[in-house]
Image (spheres, grey):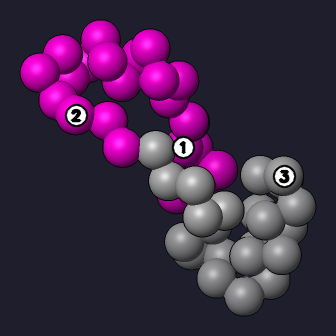
Amino acid sequence: MQRSFIARWRRTVAAWCEMIEGATVLHRSEIVRLFPAGEIWTERLM
């Protein structure tokens, strides 16, 4: 899914696409480890 978004965005916003290519998605367990006192809300819209 990420690859299809990047391919489409590369045509319209090439400079911004460079930043997205280097981004990684964190798993819930990694977020809990990084922010132990934080509250995690899960978005269900998409």
Residue matched to label 1: 23
Look at the picture and state if 18 lies above or below 34: below
**Percent of width and height locating residue 22:** 57, 44
Circle nearer the viewer, 3 or 2: 2
Q: Secondary structure at mark 2?
A: loop
**Percent of width and height locating residue 26:** 50, 29
Mark 2 touching mark 1, by CB under 8 A? no
Query: Where is the C terminus found, in terms of image quarters?
Result: bottom right
Circle nearer the viewer, 3 or 1: 3
Please report the bounds of the magenta region as a residue range: 19-41
Marks 3 and 1, Cα distance to the nearest angstrom? 14 Å
Q: How many marks?
A: 3
Which circle marks residue 39 in the picture?
2
Q: Secondary structure at mark 1?
A: loop
**Closer to the N terminus: mark 3 or mark 1?**
3
For residue 39, side relative to residue 44 (left or right): left
**Percent of width and height locating residue 3:** 84, 53
